[in-house]
Amino acid sequence: MSEPQESARSVLVTGGNRGIGRAIAEAFLAQGDKVAVTTRNGGGPDGALDVRCDVTDPEQVEAAYAEVEAAHGPVEVLVANAGITKDTLLLRMSEDDWSSVIETNLTGSFRLAKRASKGMLRLKRGRIIFISSVVGLLGSGGQVNYAASKAGLVGMARSIARELGSRGITANVVAPGFVETDMTEALTDAQKDAIKAQVPLGRYASTDEVASVVTWLASDGAGYVTGAVIPVDGGLGMGH
Ligand code: NDP
Protein backbone atom coordinates (compact mmCIF):
# COMPACT_ATOMS: atom_id res chain seq x y z
CA MET A 1 0.00 0.00 0.00
CA SER A 2 1.28 3.52 -0.84
CA GLU A 3 0.97 6.48 1.51
CA PRO A 4 -1.89 8.82 0.50
CA GLN A 5 -0.50 11.42 -1.92
CA GLU A 6 -1.26 15.11 -1.97
CA SER A 7 -3.38 14.57 -5.06
CA ALA A 8 -5.07 11.59 -3.37
CA ARG A 9 -8.77 11.37 -4.01
CA SER A 10 -11.42 10.48 -1.46
CA VAL A 11 -12.77 7.11 -2.56
CA LEU A 12 -15.72 5.27 -0.97
CA VAL A 13 -16.28 1.58 -1.64
CA THR A 14 -19.39 -0.07 -0.23
CA GLY A 15 -19.00 -3.72 0.75
CA GLY A 16 -15.22 -3.39 0.96
CA ASN A 17 -14.41 -5.95 3.65
CA ARG A 18 -14.23 -8.98 1.36
CA GLY A 19 -14.54 -10.25 -2.19
CA ILE A 20 -14.70 -7.81 -5.08
CA GLY A 21 -15.15 -4.72 -2.90
CA ARG A 22 -12.03 -5.49 -0.89
CA ALA A 23 -9.95 -5.93 -4.06
CA ILE A 24 -11.28 -2.60 -5.35
CA ALA A 25 -10.40 -0.86 -2.08
CA GLU A 26 -6.89 -2.38 -2.18
CA ALA A 27 -6.39 -1.25 -5.77
CA PHE A 28 -7.25 2.38 -4.92
CA LEU A 29 -5.03 2.22 -1.81
CA ALA A 30 -2.16 0.96 -3.98
CA GLN A 31 -2.57 4.09 -6.12
CA GLY A 32 -2.21 6.27 -3.02
CA ASP A 33 -5.87 7.30 -2.75
CA LYS A 34 -7.71 7.86 0.54
CA VAL A 35 -10.13 4.96 0.77
CA ALA A 36 -13.13 4.38 3.02
CA VAL A 37 -14.97 1.07 3.05
CA THR A 38 -18.49 0.68 4.39
CA THR A 39 -19.97 -2.63 5.52
CA ARG A 40 -22.37 -3.98 8.17
CA ASN A 41 -19.76 -6.09 9.93
CA GLY A 42 -16.65 -3.96 9.64
CA GLY A 43 -13.19 -4.88 8.44
CA GLY A 44 -11.41 -4.01 5.25
CA PRO A 45 -7.87 -3.65 4.05
CA ASP A 46 -5.16 -2.00 6.17
CA GLY A 47 -5.05 1.69 5.48
CA ALA A 48 -8.73 2.03 4.64
CA LEU A 49 -11.17 3.89 6.88
CA ASP A 50 -13.52 1.24 8.26
CA VAL A 51 -17.07 2.59 8.51
CA ARG A 52 -20.14 0.62 9.59
CA CYS A 53 -23.13 1.19 7.37
CA ASP A 54 -26.07 -0.94 6.36
CA VAL A 55 -27.04 0.43 2.96
CA THR A 56 -30.68 -0.50 3.59
CA ASP A 57 -30.89 2.16 6.31
CA PRO A 58 -31.00 5.77 5.02
CA GLU A 59 -29.88 7.19 8.39
CA GLN A 60 -26.83 4.93 8.48
CA VAL A 61 -25.96 5.97 4.92
CA GLU A 62 -26.13 9.64 5.87
CA ALA A 63 -24.05 9.13 9.04
CA ALA A 64 -21.45 7.03 7.23
CA TYR A 65 -21.14 9.56 4.46
CA ALA A 66 -20.62 12.39 6.94
CA GLU A 67 -17.93 10.33 8.71
CA VAL A 68 -16.10 9.69 5.44
CA GLU A 69 -16.28 13.33 4.38
CA ALA A 70 -14.99 14.49 7.77
CA ALA A 71 -12.00 12.13 7.55
CA HIS A 72 -11.13 12.29 3.84
CA GLY A 73 -12.98 15.27 2.36
CA PRO A 74 -15.68 15.17 -0.31
CA VAL A 75 -15.96 11.82 -2.04
CA GLU A 76 -14.73 12.01 -5.63
CA VAL A 77 -15.10 8.33 -6.47
CA LEU A 78 -18.05 6.22 -5.31
CA VAL A 79 -18.04 2.49 -5.96
CA ALA A 80 -21.46 1.04 -5.13
CA ASN A 81 -20.52 -2.60 -4.73
CA ALA A 82 -22.44 -3.96 -1.71
CA GLY A 83 -24.80 -6.67 -2.83
CA ILE A 84 -26.56 -9.86 -1.82
CA THR A 85 -28.34 -12.79 -3.44
CA LYS A 86 -31.44 -14.65 -2.26
CA ASP A 87 -31.87 -17.16 -5.04
CA THR A 88 -34.96 -19.24 -5.57
CA LEU A 89 -37.44 -20.01 -8.32
CA LEU A 90 -40.04 -17.38 -9.16
CA LEU A 91 -42.94 -19.42 -7.80
CA ARG A 92 -41.18 -19.80 -4.46
CA MET A 93 -39.81 -16.28 -4.23
CA SER A 94 -41.24 -14.53 -1.19
CA GLU A 95 -41.96 -10.80 -0.91
CA ASP A 96 -38.99 -10.64 1.46
CA ASP A 97 -36.65 -12.48 -0.98
CA TRP A 98 -37.59 -9.88 -3.56
CA SER A 99 -37.57 -6.74 -1.47
CA SER A 100 -34.41 -7.42 0.54
CA VAL A 101 -32.37 -7.94 -2.64
CA ILE A 102 -33.85 -4.88 -4.36
CA GLU A 103 -33.42 -2.83 -1.20
CA THR A 104 -29.73 -3.73 -0.80
CA ASN A 105 -28.54 -3.90 -4.41
CA LEU A 106 -30.64 -1.23 -6.10
CA THR A 107 -32.11 1.12 -3.50
CA GLY A 108 -28.90 1.02 -1.42
CA SER A 109 -26.92 2.07 -4.50
CA PHE A 110 -29.44 4.84 -5.21
CA ARG A 111 -29.01 6.19 -1.66
CA LEU A 112 -25.24 6.27 -1.99
CA ALA A 113 -25.31 7.84 -5.45
CA LYS A 114 -27.80 10.51 -4.40
CA ARG A 115 -25.71 11.47 -1.37
CA ALA A 116 -22.49 11.36 -3.42
CA SER A 117 -23.92 13.65 -6.06
CA LYS A 118 -24.24 16.52 -3.53
CA GLY A 119 -20.50 16.73 -2.93
CA MET A 120 -19.61 15.95 -6.55
CA LEU A 121 -21.82 18.77 -7.81
CA ARG A 122 -19.95 21.16 -5.53
CA LEU A 123 -16.59 19.77 -6.71
CA LYS A 124 -17.76 19.83 -10.34
CA ARG A 125 -16.25 16.39 -10.82
CA GLY A 126 -16.88 12.85 -9.73
CA ARG A 127 -16.97 9.21 -10.74
CA ILE A 128 -19.85 6.93 -9.80
CA ILE A 129 -19.32 3.24 -10.54
CA PHE A 130 -22.00 0.62 -9.95
CA ILE A 131 -21.12 -3.07 -9.67
CA SER A 132 -23.84 -4.87 -11.58
CA SER A 133 -23.59 -8.39 -13.03
CA VAL A 134 -23.73 -10.23 -16.33
CA VAL A 135 -26.95 -11.67 -14.93
CA GLY A 136 -28.62 -8.25 -15.03
CA LEU A 137 -28.40 -8.34 -18.82
CA LEU A 138 -28.61 -12.06 -19.61
CA GLY A 139 -31.12 -13.07 -16.95
CA SER A 140 -30.70 -16.14 -14.80
CA GLY A 141 -33.20 -18.78 -13.70
CA GLY A 142 -33.60 -18.64 -9.93
CA GLN A 143 -32.40 -15.05 -9.74
CA VAL A 144 -35.39 -12.95 -10.75
CA ASN A 145 -34.83 -10.60 -7.80
CA TYR A 146 -31.05 -10.33 -8.26
CA ALA A 147 -31.19 -9.89 -12.05
CA ALA A 148 -33.86 -7.19 -11.71
CA SER A 149 -31.75 -5.33 -9.14
CA LYS A 150 -28.65 -5.51 -11.35
CA ALA A 151 -30.54 -4.47 -14.51
CA GLY A 152 -31.95 -1.54 -12.55
CA LEU A 153 -28.43 -0.26 -11.95
CA VAL A 154 -27.96 0.15 -15.70
CA GLY A 155 -30.99 2.43 -16.06
CA MET A 156 -29.94 4.33 -12.96
CA ALA A 157 -26.36 4.86 -14.14
CA ARG A 158 -27.45 5.98 -17.59
CA SER A 159 -29.96 8.44 -16.13
CA ILE A 160 -27.34 9.85 -13.76
CA ALA A 161 -24.91 10.09 -16.68
CA ARG A 162 -27.46 12.25 -18.51
CA GLU A 163 -28.41 14.35 -15.47
CA LEU A 164 -24.91 15.08 -14.23
CA GLY A 165 -22.66 14.80 -17.29
CA SER A 166 -22.56 18.55 -17.81
CA ARG A 167 -21.20 18.91 -14.26
CA GLY A 168 -18.15 16.75 -14.87
CA ILE A 169 -19.62 13.66 -13.22
CA THR A 170 -19.56 10.27 -14.92
CA ALA A 171 -21.68 7.24 -14.03
CA ASN A 172 -20.78 3.79 -15.30
CA VAL A 173 -21.56 0.15 -14.68
CA VAL A 174 -19.16 -2.77 -14.36
CA ALA A 175 -20.83 -6.11 -15.08
CA PRO A 176 -18.70 -8.99 -13.80
CA GLY A 177 -19.36 -12.56 -14.80
CA PHE A 178 -18.46 -15.22 -12.26
CA VAL A 179 -15.80 -14.18 -9.79
CA GLU A 180 -14.09 -16.23 -7.08
CA THR A 181 -15.69 -14.88 -3.88
CA ASP A 182 -17.88 -16.02 -0.95
CA MET A 183 -20.92 -15.32 -3.13
CA THR A 184 -19.96 -17.91 -5.75
CA GLU A 185 -18.45 -20.30 -3.17
CA ALA A 186 -22.06 -21.10 -2.28
CA LEU A 187 -22.53 -22.83 -5.69
CA THR A 188 -22.13 -26.60 -6.00
CA ASP A 189 -19.17 -28.04 -7.94
CA ALA A 190 -21.57 -29.18 -10.66
CA GLN A 191 -22.97 -25.63 -10.98
CA LYS A 192 -19.44 -24.19 -11.11
CA ASP A 193 -18.40 -26.62 -13.86
CA ALA A 194 -21.54 -25.84 -15.86
CA ILE A 195 -20.79 -22.12 -15.62
CA LYS A 196 -17.15 -22.51 -16.68
CA ALA A 197 -18.27 -24.53 -19.71
CA GLN A 198 -20.25 -21.47 -20.89
CA VAL A 199 -17.41 -18.98 -20.44
CA PRO A 200 -15.16 -18.57 -23.50
CA LEU A 201 -12.16 -17.97 -21.22
CA GLY A 202 -13.08 -21.18 -19.36
CA ARG A 203 -12.54 -19.87 -15.83
CA TYR A 204 -13.82 -17.51 -13.17
CA ALA A 205 -12.44 -14.00 -12.85
CA SER A 206 -10.16 -13.04 -9.99
CA THR A 207 -11.33 -10.12 -7.88
CA ASP A 208 -8.29 -8.16 -9.10
CA GLU A 209 -9.49 -8.46 -12.69
CA VAL A 210 -12.69 -6.63 -11.70
CA ALA A 211 -10.83 -4.09 -9.56
CA SER A 212 -8.51 -3.04 -12.38
CA VAL A 213 -11.48 -2.10 -14.58
CA VAL A 214 -12.97 -0.07 -11.74
CA THR A 215 -9.77 1.88 -11.11
CA TRP A 216 -9.48 2.51 -14.83
CA LEU A 217 -13.04 3.93 -14.92
CA ALA A 218 -12.03 6.28 -12.11
CA SER A 219 -8.82 7.34 -13.87
CA ASP A 220 -8.19 10.41 -16.02
CA GLY A 221 -7.90 8.07 -19.00
CA ALA A 222 -11.60 7.23 -18.72
CA GLY A 223 -12.70 10.87 -18.56
CA TYR A 224 -14.89 10.59 -21.67
CA VAL A 225 -16.58 7.31 -20.68
CA THR A 226 -20.04 7.65 -19.17
CA GLY A 227 -23.26 5.65 -19.26
CA ALA A 228 -21.23 2.60 -20.25
CA VAL A 229 -21.71 -0.99 -19.18
CA ILE A 230 -18.32 -2.70 -19.10
CA PRO A 231 -18.44 -6.49 -18.98
CA VAL A 232 -15.69 -8.32 -17.07
CA ASP A 233 -17.07 -11.76 -17.74
CA GLY A 234 -14.61 -13.79 -19.79
CA GLY A 235 -16.92 -13.42 -22.81
CA LEU A 236 -19.98 -14.98 -21.14
CA GLY A 237 -22.39 -12.22 -22.10
CA MET A 238 -20.90 -11.40 -25.49
CA GLY A 239 -23.20 -9.23 -27.49
CA HIS A 240 -25.11 -7.53 -24.72
P1 NDP B 1 -19.52 -10.92 -1.11
O1 NDP B 1 -20.73 -11.66 -0.67
O2 NDP B 1 -18.17 -11.55 -0.99
O3 NDP B 1 -19.47 -9.51 -0.36
C1 NDP B 1 -20.60 -8.69 -0.29
C2 NDP B 1 -20.21 -7.38 0.35
O4 NDP B 1 -21.38 -6.55 0.48
C3 NDP B 1 -19.65 -7.57 1.75
O5 NDP B 1 -18.62 -6.65 1.95
C4 NDP B 1 -20.84 -7.24 2.64
O6 NDP B 1 -20.38 -6.79 3.90
C5 NDP B 1 -21.53 -6.14 1.84
N1 NDP B 1 -22.96 -6.01 2.12
C6 NDP B 1 -23.94 -6.91 1.90
N2 NDP B 1 -25.12 -6.42 2.32
C7 NDP B 1 -24.89 -5.18 2.79
C8 NDP B 1 -25.70 -4.16 3.37
N3 NDP B 1 -27.02 -4.31 3.55
N4 NDP B 1 -25.12 -3.00 3.74
C9 NDP B 1 -23.80 -2.82 3.57
N5 NDP B 1 -22.97 -3.73 3.04
C10 NDP B 1 -23.51 -4.90 2.67
O7 NDP B 1 -19.84 -10.47 -2.59
P2 NDP B 1 -18.91 -10.33 -3.89
O8 NDP B 1 -17.63 -9.69 -3.54
O9 NDP B 1 -18.94 -11.60 -4.59
O10 NDP B 1 -19.81 -9.30 -4.73
C11 NDP B 1 -19.65 -7.91 -4.69
C12 NDP B 1 -20.58 -7.29 -5.70
O11 NDP B 1 -20.30 -7.83 -6.99
C13 NDP B 1 -22.06 -7.59 -5.42
O12 NDP B 1 -22.82 -6.46 -5.75
C14 NDP B 1 -22.34 -8.72 -6.36
O13 NDP B 1 -23.70 -8.77 -6.70
C15 NDP B 1 -21.47 -8.38 -7.55
N6 NDP B 1 -21.13 -9.49 -8.40
C16 NDP B 1 -20.48 -10.61 -7.89
C17 NDP B 1 -20.17 -11.65 -8.74
C18 NDP B 1 -19.47 -12.88 -8.27
O14 NDP B 1 -19.33 -13.81 -9.06
N7 NDP B 1 -18.99 -12.96 -7.04
C19 NDP B 1 -20.50 -11.60 -10.16
C20 NDP B 1 -21.15 -10.39 -10.58
C21 NDP B 1 -21.45 -9.39 -9.72
P3 NDP B 1 -21.18 -7.09 5.27
O15 NDP B 1 -21.75 -8.48 5.13
O16 NDP B 1 -20.18 -6.93 6.36
O17 NDP B 1 -22.22 -6.03 5.31
Image (tube, rainbow, N blue to C red):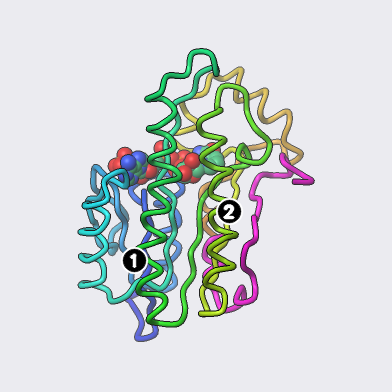
Image position of 10 (left or right of 148):
left
Question: Which amino acid type is marked by label 1?
Answer: Val
Which residue is under mark 2?
174
Can you say whether 66 is above or below 135 in the image?
Answer: below
Total number of numbered discs in the rendering: 2
Q: Is residue 215 magenta?
A: yes
Spot occupied by residue 162 in the image (x, y as percentages of width and height): 59, 68
Query: What residue occupies the far bottom of the structure in this picture?
Result: 6
User: Residue 103, percent across and down?
Assistant: 39, 39
In what quadrant does ligand 1 lie? top left
Q: Residues within 10 Å of mark 1 (few under 14, many from 20)?
A: many
**CA distance for labels 2 and 1:** 19 Å
The residue shown at (77%, 44%) is: 238
Q: Which residue sits at x=61%, y=17%?
A: 190
**Which image quadrant: the N terminus?**
bottom left
Identify the residue under disc 1.
35
Span of residues in magenta = 214-240
In the orientation shown, which residue stands out farthest toward the top? Answer: 92
Label at residue 102: none
Residue 180 visible in the displayed image: no
Where residue 152 sits: x, y (%)?
A: 55, 45
Taking depth in this image into account, of 118 and 64 the one nearest to the observer is 118
Q: Secondary structure at mark 1?
A: strand
Q: Residue furthest right?
A: 239
